Amino acid sequence: MKTLKILSIIFLAIMATGCKKYLDLKPQSDISDVTYWQSANDFRLAANWFYDRSLEDPHFSGTYMNDNNSDIAFGMEISTISSGKYVAPEQDANWDNSYSAIRNANKLIEQGTTSVLKNDVKPFLGEGYFFRAYNYFRLLDLFGGVPIIDKVLQPSDPLVFSGRASREDVAAFIMADLNNAIANLPVKTSAEKGRICKEAAQAFKARVCLFEGTWRKFHAAGDGNALLDQAIAESNNVINSNAYSLNKLRSDSSYRLMFIDNYSMDNPETIVSKKYRTNINVAGWAYSVSWGNLNPTKAAADMYLSKDGLPIDKSPLFKGYDSVRTEFRNRDPRMAQSLILPAIKIVRPQYDKYRPQWPGVDNNRNVNSGYMLYKFISQMPTPGDGGGAFDWNVIRYAEVLAIYAEATYERNGSISDADLDKSINLLRDRVNMPHLTNALVNGNGLNMQTEIRRERTVELAFEGFRWGDLRRWKIAETILPKSMLSVKVTGSEWSKQILTLDGSTYNSYFYNTPANQLENGFKVLQPGSQRAFDVNKNYLLPIPTKQISLNPDKLKQNPGW
């Protein structure tokens, strides 16, 4: 486990804010626990570190890569996880970075609980509990049970070589931290935009409770009902707080534009966000996505309902795959706001303006799935790498609504129309889609659980949730071994040459695709024969081998690795 010296972190925070107290009056070498924690502002500066270095973002933590490990997205290279070729690494940034953040949270909590400043530092103590829980949940999600370290350790401390706590104990520890966070954090106010508040901790607790409650339910790992009850209660607390609402500021385009507008602090839907800065470079991530690092698949495209609220295999409004235009016609508007439609104009400073004749076809031909991601991609040029300058939503209100619906259904085995109206149907109202009702489900041979999961997948598509969802629902073993498909080639425009803006032609990525690379006429990105999921192994990632070698007696590897 890596250790970060909190004093150096605090010093960097002081440098960043130009704190005269220390820069002018104290030599740098004199900054210590004794001299530092003297005011509420000192605690604020220490807490600021977590917003920059601990919150996940798509560029540094690779949040979107989780979707590349699933069925709805495909990267420029085949995922070693989905192909069954992933090997236990010597080091893993998820492990190292999480424990570094946990150590810093432990320092903040220790100082906050003993400080004579008491109420003045309560908000920052609450932030310490929140971020410790946040990082332990990342570990729980990926690795299962892990060592619980709840105090700052010195290299000589025997607890440095702690064994793994059980999954249940880690979950309980996270719950306790979030309860402490909720008790110490203030409610959301306009004066502290961007800081973690009580409602943010409740929303995150709802996320954790849904994840772990459904994990226990579907993995037969104990009774998940108590956790599902808490997921319902905490999501309901956020709903009833009226602190957040869905973003409808841009009318029919609100869904798409809220991901590329750099105003998350004023976005009524944002609960927690990673604020855009050039050195964070979320913009660079958007640019890499536009070049094919995250390509939607046929499975993703098929998720979007027809305008009558029915799946495409049941709706008379679906016009088939033979034309790209007909595939997108009469569909949930979020499809056109997430995947590029024909004739969408994209501008980048590195190369000429282009207007694809159909999705995924540009002058550089970098997209290999046929579908091209539109979500997060700005149509306007920006300096530098050509990405979009936007904040990254870590938690948004739409997720809370999806949590409420799913937790209610999984806890009770049913959900009322009233509960659907206060959750999922608000998401549908934003894009003018028909409501999900029990009558619609029963009258059309649908499955309520499937439709609730569909709504979650569509609303949160490409935000990094899908791989975790497949694992907690314990359907990864069924979904991931299937062939990964892209666009219809046989009999469609994709089998033809492409006319460019200057009137010349070139072969599309799919022109003359060999028959052995097609499945029912669809381009095969990765055949099922090359995709593998070991049910006894792949629901968790391996613990980094370096950690095992440092503590072989107590730190045991996950099964199968």
Image (cartoon, grey):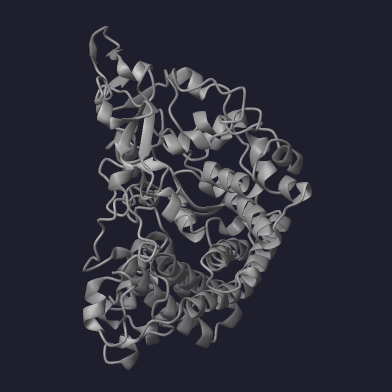
Residue at x-position 59% and y-position 34%: 311
Residue 561 image offset from top left, x and y in percent: 28, 69
Q: Is residue 89 found left or right of 18 in the rendered image?
A: left
Say which quarter of the image contains residue 552: bottom left
**Residue nearer the viewer, 264 or 374:** 374
Looking at the picture, how far across and down is residue 477, in whole percent?
42, 55
State left or right for residue 112 relative to residue 315.
Answer: left
Residue 143's x, y, as percent? 38, 69
Res 464 seen here:
no
Relative to residue 150, is residue 4 depicted above or below? above
In which quarter of the view is residue 447 placed?
A: top right
Say whether residue 382 is left or right of residue 330.
Answer: left
Please state the total of marks drawn on the protein image: 0
Task: Identify which residue is drawn at 56% across, 31% down.
Answer: 313
Residue at 59%, 32% in the rendered image: 250
Q: Give whichever of 113, 453 is nearer the camera.
A: 453
Rendered location of residue 248, percent (x, y): 63, 37
Q: Residue at x 50, y 34 (%)?
A: 302
- Quadrant location, the N terminus: bottom left
User: In terms of depth relative to the viewer, which is nearer, 236 or 367?
Assistant: 367
Q: Is residue 265 visible?
A: yes
Among the 4 quarters of the image, the one containing residue 360:
top left
